[in-house]
Amino acid sequence: MTQQEISLTKSLHSGGQFVLFNDSANSRNVNPLSYHNFVGDYGEKWLVSQFNQSGYIAQLTSQTAHEGDLRVLDTQTREYIKIEAKTALETTSGYGFCINKLKKTSCSYSDFVALICIDKCLSHYLYLIHPSLLQNSQFIRIPSHPTRYAGKYAPFRVRGLINIEDSRTTHETWSIR
């Protein structure tokens, strides 16, 4: 299935699961801006469900405040964590994420940036990265499938349930290098 054939024109939320439909007949009629927003909204909702399944209490935030896309309560420490979510679909050149765009997007006010990769089979892969590692980047690319990717951000891939402490430890270890 090619990238053009994957059209995320519908999203259903049922029992905590999100379902994407392939609707290649309508894929040519999708406004690219609304399509881009739809993919981003889908990624944010998927991420909320992943945090909730991992024992956190997560909710979407107001887009007007500099709070990130999600506000997550760590139920053990009672700490609120701000998460900026970035979602990308697989293309022939991998996964591309707009990280910082003047007056549009900034990750600097978040505690973590979540990179959500959705491959051609609609499998999801999550990277949880501290924003200090992305400060000078406007755009980053994960050039290969997340299961094969061994580059700079590979240590930040989440496997299984989300654990904020693991992500903090990975950041501390990585930034010492």
Image (cartoon, rainbow, N blue to C red):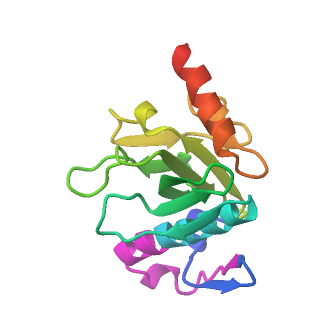
Q: Is residue 6 above or below residue 13?
A: above
Residue drawn at 26 percent across, 58 percent down: 104
The C terminus appears in which quarter of the rendering?
top right
Q: Is residue 19 magenta?
A: yes
Q: Nearer the viewer, residue 148 or 49?
A: 49
Is residue 135 visible in the rendered image? The answer is yes
Magenta stretch bounds: 18-38
Q: Is residue 55 above or below residue 25?
A: above
Q: Is residue 55 magenta?
A: no
The N terminus appears in which quarter of the rendering?
bottom right
Image side of residue 109 versus residue 50, left or right: left
Q: Is residue 34 above or below residue 148?
A: below
Residue 154 in the image: x percent, y percent? Answer: 64, 33
Is residue 154 visible in the rendered image? The answer is no
- Going by the picture, which residue comes out furthest to the right? 160
Q: Is residue 68 above or below residue 4?
A: above
Residue 136 in the image: x percent, y percent? Answer: 32, 32
Residue 10 in the image: x percent, y percent? Answer: 58, 85
Residue 124 in which image quadrant: bottom right
Image side of residue 152 versus residue 105, left or right: right
- Going by the picture, which residue comes out furthest to the left? 103
Residue drawn at 39 percent across, 77 percent down: 34
Residue drawn at 41 percent across, 58 percent down: 68
- Going by the picture, which residue comes out furthest to the top? 177
**What count of labels does the image hold?**
0
Residue 96 in the image: x percent, y percent? Answer: 47, 49
Q: Nearer the viewer, residue 75 or 177?
A: 75
Residue drawn at 69 percent across, 51 percent down: 76
